[in-house]
Image (tube, grey):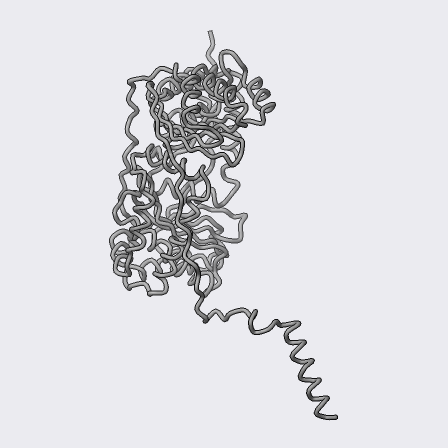
Amino acid sequence: MKLQRKLITLFLASFLSILFCGSSVYAQKSPKDKFIFPQLNPIKMPKVERVELKNGLELFLVEDHEYPTIDMRAMVRLGSVFESASKIGLASMTGRVLRTGGTTSMTGDQIDKELETMAAYVSTGIGLTSGYITVSVLKEDIDRALEILADILMNPAFKEDKIYLAKIREKTAISRRNDEVGQIAYREFQKLIYGKDSPYARHPEYATIEAITRQDIVDFYNKYFFPNNIIMAVWGDFSPKDMVAKIKKALGKWKEKEAEVPALPKVSYEYKYTINYINKSDVNQSNIMLGHIGGLRDNPDYPALSVMNSILAWDRMYKKIRTDEGLAYSVWGYYGANYQVPGVFRCEAQTKSESTVYAIELMLKELKRIREEEVSSAELARAKDEYLNSFVFNFDSRAKIVNRLMTYAFFGYPLDFMDRVKKGVEKVTKEDVLRVAKKYLRPDKVQILVVGKKEDFDKPLATLGEVNVIDIKIPPLKPQKKTGN
C-alpha cells in the first residue's frame, strides 16, 4: 500500500512538473549554453536603373509591384549655409513657400485640395546642406501628380500671404526655442564646436526673419532650382521605361542652367579645453555635453571609428555611468561623421543636479581609458556583431535602398560605400580601436557644456576650470524708426 502511494506520488509530481514547468525537451536554455543560429539569407539587391535626362535631371529608379503606389524623393544642391548672415531663415522659408505659395495657375490651397482627393502629397523643404522634394501618389494618379510637381518646380508664385504665414511660423519657433533643455544643449554645443557665427551653427532671429522679402525668396529659388542641380529617386509600381517617359513629359521642358553652385563653407576648428554653463533654474537635473570636432565618412578609419564609438557609448559610458554608478537617465557617446563637412564628436549625459560634476569626471575618465588600454575581446565582438547583425535592415525596403544610393551620388560617394564600410568593420581589430581612439579623441581638449541649476551641483563647475556663462536670451525685434516729412 505504501509502495502504491509512493508510486502515485511520484507520478503526480512528474505530471505536475511537466504540466506547469514543461519537460526537459522544451526547457529554456541557460544563457551559458551555446546557441547555434542558421546563416542569414544573402541580401538580394533590387535592380536600380540610373538615367540622366537631357536637361541634366538625374534619376534613380527601382521597380516594386508590392503596392499600387509610386513614391519620389529628390535632393537639391543648396542649403541654409548659403544664406547671408542678415537673412538667416531664408532657405527654410523658400523651401516652405515653394510648396504652400502655389503656382501661376493654382493657389497653394487649390493644390492641397486636389492632392487630398487623390490621397497624394507633394512637399518641399530646405535644410542645412540640401533641399528636398517628396511625392507620394497612387499609381493611377501619377500623371496628374507629376503635372502638379512640375508646375510647383517650374512656375512657383511665392504668394505674399503664404510668406507672411511662413514668417509667423518661424517667429513662433524662435519664441519657443528655449523650452526644451535638450534642444538648448544641442544648439549651443553646435556653436561651441563650429563657432557662433558659423553657417553650420547659427539660427534665425526675429530680425533676420523680418528682413526677408519676397524678392529674396525669388532670387534664392532662381539661383539653385534647376534640373541639373537635382537628383531624384523613384520607387514603386511602374516599369522604368514608362516612368522615364512620364518624367520627361512633365519635367523635360525645364531648362538646365550653367550656374555653378558654390562649395560648402569650410570648417576651421581649434582644439581647446573649455567649461561652459547655461543657467536653467527650473530643472532638477543637468544636461551635459562634452566633445570636439568629428570627421568625414570617407575617412579610411571610419569603420574602426564606428566600432570604437559603439564600445565607448555602450560598454564604457552607459555601463559605467548608468549601470554601475546609477547616475544618469541616459548617457552615450557619438563620433559624428558627415559626408562633406566634419561632424561633431560628443558625449552626453542627463543626471540629477547633485551628481553633475562627478558624472563629468567619470565621462572624462572613460574617454581617457579608451585611449590608454586595449578594449576586451568581448567588447570588440559585441560592437562588431551589433553592426554586422543589423546590416540587413539597411535593405528591408526599396525606399531605403534607392534613397541611400541617391544620397551617395549626391555627395560624391561610391554607390557601394556601405558595403565597403561593412568589409572594413569585419576587419577591425583591438589594435585598430586603440589606434583610432588615440588619433582622434582629445579628452584633454574637450569643450564641456552644462545646462542646469548650479546651486544644486555636487561641486562648483569651477573645480573643472574657468567657467564661461552662455546667455541664451532671445533678442527682441527692435522697433523701426519712424521717418517724418
- Residue 178, percent across and down? 50, 39
Residue 395 in picture, x, y percent from top left: 42, 44
Residue depicted at x 27% and y 62%: 372
- The residue drawn where x is 69% and y is 89% is 6
Q: Does 479 sit above or below residue 365? A: above
The one nearer the camera, 215 or 242, is: 242
Q: Position of residue 221 (x, y in %)?
A: 40, 19
The residue under the point 47% across, 35% down is 64
User: In this rendering, would 349 be left or right of 409?
Assistant: right
Front-most of 169 and 205? 169
User: Of all residues shown, which one is farthest toward the top?
Assistant: 485
Question: For residue 223, which quarter of the picture?
Answer: top left
Residue 362 in view here: no
- Give the x, y percent position of residue 315: 40, 61
Nearest to the observer: residue 176 or residue 329:
329
Quarter placement of the N terminus: bottom right
**Against 466, is 216 above or below?**
above
Q: Is residue 413 visible to us here?
A: yes
